[in-house]
Amino acid sequence: MALIVEKFGGTSVATVDRIKAVADIVIAARKQGHQVVVVLSAMAGETDRLIELAGQVAKNPDSRELDVLLSTGEQVTIALLSMVLQEHDYPAVSYTGGQVHILTDNVHNKARIIDIEAVRVKKDLADNKIVVIAGFQGIDENGNITTLGRGGTDTTAVAMAVALNADECRIYTDVDGVYTADPRIVPGARRMDKIAYEEMLELASLGAKVLQIRSVEFANKYKVPLRVLSSFEEGPGTLITDEDEEMERALIAGIAHNLDEAKLTLRGVPDRPGIAGAILNPIAEADIEVDMIVQNVGVDHLTDFTFTVHRNDFGKARALLEKTARKLDAKEVLADDRIVKISVVGVGMRSHAGIASKMFSALAGEGINIQMISTSEIKISVVVDEKYLELGVRTLHSAFGLEGDDNIIDDAAG
Ligand code: ADP
Ligand code: ASP
Ligand code: MG
């Protein structure tokens, strides 16, 4: 007998029929003798609908009240699934995040889980119940409802698996695993049987929305075996696990893209010590995260300074930068929110040179101009015009031979 946490995302619970199909998957695990804890998202589109509703009544909805509103979506699906399971004569009980003490910090809309008091869930499991928990939500120490950021149900599921010391955490979604690129963008993308935590962390942080980054961080930290599967068809899915020899042979694991960023440039600022701080401090003080940063080589004591922020922060960051521009007597502020960041990720990069040049030539071959570049040990990212999203990702996918086996490092050559 194993203890399994099963998470189902929005499309997997989008309708009553889909919820019934989820019940069948849960019951199948029970029939195999497992204890099951289910973590659910809201029905597909519901969280967006609630955000839109809030937007109809307030220009900048209060973040605490927004969390009260957003947490309702998951409350609907957990109750419905419990009812379906009970109709099949399985004892099921649903809980909101607060009811099972998913304690978070108090940063509304992007709270982090601090602790889970699993006593109640453990007792229910001992009583042979199926426990159904609302994803994406918790409470802070003052009892306020919080939410964990978009995609946060993945994180609830993994955190629950850690708290219960579960044997496996299964993330059921609308694709049958983790692919070498978003299969919606690259039809020829390939499902991976396994991927290393480290590579999955990079892919998730670089935009692959199949798993929320925090969930992979938890899984890696506590070594929870994590599997991504389809709730629509049976299959082995993708196991996210520690790196092994087989994986090391793959040069590039996959390609991620991120459409959520926007680019700001301060042109013609005095090129002197302290300038980067002077530009970025007001941005940091406004709690805006900066991702990529490029400062050009100075010419005639002037330089250009470019950075990217989340598109949600674009307007605010631009206004702050315009203020800084006046203060520093810079030439102008350039702003562009029609960009995409495309990244190639793979642990094979550690031991193999030439990946960057291959990436840049492939993009150049299609006439795609690179606006920014950033690299780290196992990834290379470029920013290009948003219109090149599909062409860029597909070009790199085939340049690195990700459809076939060419991506395997040739021992003789390598
Ligand atoms: P859920 O509602 O189940 O949480 P999401 O929409 O959050 O589902 O995540 C699944 C989606 O992630 C897929 O439909 C796919 O378009 C997208 N995706 C992006 N990158 C990848 C990737 N590398 N492998 C698989 N899916 C990916
Ligand atoms: N319902 C939330 C969202 O749409 C959380 C989740 O589905 O993971 O982001
Ligand atoms: Mg998701």
Image: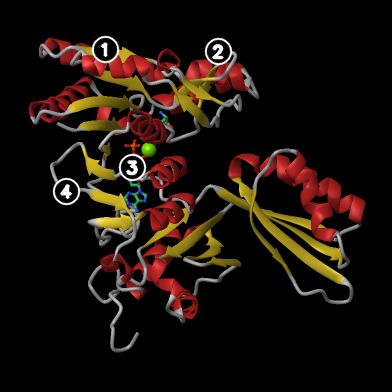
Q: Which mark is residue 224?
A: 3
Outermost bottom residue? 412
Whole-Å distance between the Cαs marked 3 and 1? Answer: 24 Å
Specify which label sits upstream in the sequence, 4 or 1.
1
Query: Looking at the image, do the residues carrying marks 2 and 4 touch, with CB atoms under 8 Å apart?
Result: no
Query: Looking at the image, do the residues carrying marks 4 and 1 touch, with CB atoms under 8 Å apart?
Result: no
Judge whether residue 20 can be spotted in this image.
yes
Give the vertical position of 139 relative to 242 (above or below): above
Mark 1 residue element: strand
Query: Which amino acid type is marked by label 1?
Result: Val
Q: Position of residue 66 (x, y in %)?
A: 55, 20
Q: Residues within 10 Å of mark 3 (few under 14, many from 20)?
A: many
Residue bearing mark 4? 236
Residue in view at x 89 percent, y 51 percent: 326
Q: Nearer the viewer, residue 115 or 257?
A: 115
Picture quarter with the C terminus: bottom left
Query: Which amino acid type is marked by label 4?
Result: Pro
Left or right: 6, with 384 as reference point: left
Mark 4 residue element: loop
Q: Nearer the viewer, residue 340 or 19?
A: 19
Between marks 3 and 4 in the image, the one whose residue lies nearer the viewer: 3
Q: Position of residue 215 (x, y in %)?
A: 41, 40
Specify which label sits upstream in the sequence, 3 or 4.
3
Q: Residues within 10 Å of mark 2 (few under 14, many from 20)?
A: few
Residue bearing mark 2? 143
Residue bearing mark 1? 93
Specify which label sits upstream in the sequence, 3 or 1.
1
Q: Quarter containing ligand 2?
A: top left
Specify which label sits upstream in the sequence, 3 or 2.
2
Specify which label sits upstream in the sequence, 2 or 4.
2
